[in-house]
Image (spheres, rainbow, N blue to C red):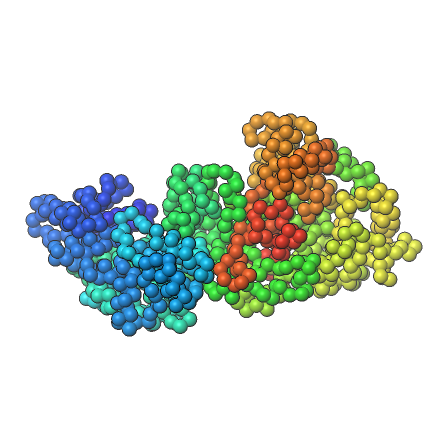
Amino acid sequence: MQERRPRLVVVGSRLRAYREYAMASLAREYEISLVTSQELTWEKPYVSAYRIADTTRAEPLRAAVEELHAEAAEADSEQAPAGLFTWDELSLIATARVAEELGLPHLSAAAAEACRDKYTTRSLLDRAGLPGVRHRLVHSAEQAAAGAAEIGYPVVLKPRSLAGSMGVTLVRTPSELADAYAQVAGTTFPGIRTEHGVLVEEYLTGPEISVDSCVIDGEAEPVFVARKRLGHDPAFEEVGHLVGPWRHEPWAEEAEALVRNAHRALGIDRGITHTEIRLTPSGCRLIELNGRLGGDLIPYLGTLARGIDLTLAGAALASGRVPDLAPRHDRYAEVRFLYPPHDGVLEGLDLGQAAEVPGVTDVVPLAAPGDELLLPPRALTPRTAAVIAAGEDERACTTALDRAEAEIRPVLGGSPLDGLGALMENPVTRRYLSAERQPADMVVPQLRNDWNGYGAGGGKALNRPVFLDSSDRLRLEADLNGLFTLLTTIPDRLFDGDRRAFARAVGMTDTQVDLVMRGAGRRMPAMSRADMYREPGGFKLMELNTGSSLGGWQMGEFSRPADRNRAFQDFARAERLTHPDPIGRIADVLRAEAADAGFALPARPVLALTEWPDGYAYTKPWLDFVVPDWLRHGFDAVVCSLGEFEYRDGVPHVHGRKVDVVYRIFLPGEMADEQRSRDLVDPLLDAVHDGHTFLFAGLDCELYGNKGSLAMLSDERNRGAFTSEELDLVERILPWTRFLRDEKVHREGGTVDLIPYVLEHKDGLALKPTLLYGGVGVIPGWSVSQEEWEGHVRGAVGGPFVVQERVLPVAERFVAEDGTGFERMVVAYGVLMVGGAYSGMLVRGTPDPRVGIVSMSNGAQIGCCYHVTDEAEGEA
């Protein structure tokens, strides 16, 4: 005969994604009767009987429970009345009252009310003499301002009786308080009784943990601890939790004592509880104590990490028994909640291969198509998905979650402009800016020194590096290598190998074509810099520069001062962050190219970093800046313009020294004056041809690295020349780009006359010269009037110009200049590739997402990028 299972009445089931694990666990050991406020859906497989009632009020709840008891007794008169159990915050007080009235084991109603009311919690803790949090209960904005002034800014405002960090807001300055108070005071949640008043509390710094405990006969026994991940400043959104070993921590004994004493102070004598604690520099402080099972899948993490099922422990207590709390193992488990980059209606959620990532145990969709997702503080937990990982240490969980997150992409409806300036940060950046770290540790002041300022052309440096996680780095590396290779094949695919025809097609003059062909190298060195923005769907290319005339190589020298910042280096070691040595990699490519050309370099070559005379004054600071790196790599570097060259019997000299290598910074696009260009360039090419010096790199590099070449890749008329995989690459990375011609083109699923279309859609297009770089000559349509736009467009038709679809960049946070809070900055990424490998970034950031060109002249700041590397990979 099958063994009879004990009965259990569960009150309130709530959301499937967050509680099905608990219901499934109970159903394996109990016959479940459910009291719920709505018809059953996902609960059906687990429930044998149910009643629909208002679970937030004791009277209708008791009637439903008694009906279920009577029904069960009629079926089996010998079985004891079922225990009463809830994990539902909304139903806690009513369930406690019904349990008291029916004489069932449960948390008392008085203790439940003390947990639900944060002001009562604070008062009882103060009365017990426990370490306190300064607070005031206020009922108006004026009282809130007075309380905040007395406590001292920053302060935290909290609704008195809500849960799950709903409405909790950080207020840093008096000017923010009135709006924050109105928002907090107006925060409600259906079904939760709202007590009058708002709590103003002192802001506590330090990491936050939660302690899930089992309480028997008034003694709380901590079962596991979760490290809380917070986000969406100034809200206190819980974006993840990590459960793992904790008894070895320096705060363990103090936290355990606080938990036990707080339970006594609130009169909690039975049940499962969830205590939230801030680990401040002056000790542990209790944030809140909840008289029910923890939320956000934390108990499930506890089962993965320790093998203890806290749901079953709670059911045992509700049934009058002592639960088994013996751990089966001591591992780590972590949940990470994912959010949309901006407000919007979800159209789709692509989970990719996230579930296949090693270490990932669960991928749980939390939103469905049609759901409106509003980011905090406008809404509560607008999550798209939860990802859970388990492993032997925290790093294993982090690695698995980072890889899984990179697979998941939400698709939001609405206008593409909704994504402009949206906050979108990779996991490394979020950890760097997490609430667990101090604001002073989120900046690297050493980056803002006079030498770096000089190397940035006198501009200001960002106050921290940006970060590139491994998934994005590998994707960028693969895409940019693929694009580089694709560009080099254009002459053969589209011009039958005629490179002169190709040069004319991208907009070069006859003189430029002649000089470029004469100055062509044996091959194009594998060097490029892609100027990119990041959109919600991934990185998009604005232009790709090839050859030696690349900015960005100074970022190796620029990043070095960060090595002197202890907090940054501690973080970098923990995250396996490094910075490439771009000059070292370029030096290797240069030596290989010289050897391939049969040019024997001396032991310590003289390297002339050579700019066109007209741009020399602008370029000289960042050329000077990289001289130390070239010296370290065995080259005597000299900074000069091409006009400073002196030819002695055809041998180039500069500043009295023979030039062994001309490192070319100047561009064919600068050779506008035909005779002057020949006078400057021809003697150099003669010297190269006669073997007196080595030119790095050939003038033909810019045939490929220009916007005209990108237009050829983007043009639908050329699709037949490329494979489906190549077209997928172009579609993924390149915005729609066309030569500005009076012709018909394909656009948005149809055929349009290009010029009228361009004139009509200025806010979504930019006009760009094909052969200039660094934003020179670019006209962003959204930054000028309609009249100006029409003038620029009509003047450029048929010339060396393209129009390109506007890229809508997302933003990330930097500590504000006054040190309080964050400011959002749009980041432009200059991704440097050398020898087929990612070699660093020239980063520029601006607080204005609508800026046409991210440049220092438009207020942008310059910075470097550290990336996640494999431990075996060596970097400088």
The picture quadrant where one finds residue 220 is bottom left
What residue is rendered at 67% in x and 27% in y?
743
Residue 305 visible to an observer of this rendering: no
Q: Residue at x 20, y 64 (%)?
A: 269
Please provide percent x and percent y for residue 555: 65, 58
- Location of residue 505 (image quadrant): top right
- In percent of width and height, residue 42 lies at 28, 42
What residue is drawn where x is 11% and y is 53%?
Answer: 80
Q: Look at the image and tell me in which quarter the C terminus lies.
A: bottom right
Horizontally, residue 821 falls left or right of residue 183, namely: right
The mark tally for this picture is 0
Q: Inspect this view and state whether residue 452 appears.
A: yes
Indicate whether 286 appears above or below 66. Answer: below
The residue located at (26%, 52%) in the rendering is: 193
In this rendered view, identify the residue nearer to me: 504 or 443.
Answer: 443
In this picture, is 539 found above or below 109? above
- Residue 565 in picture, x, y percent from top left: 57, 68
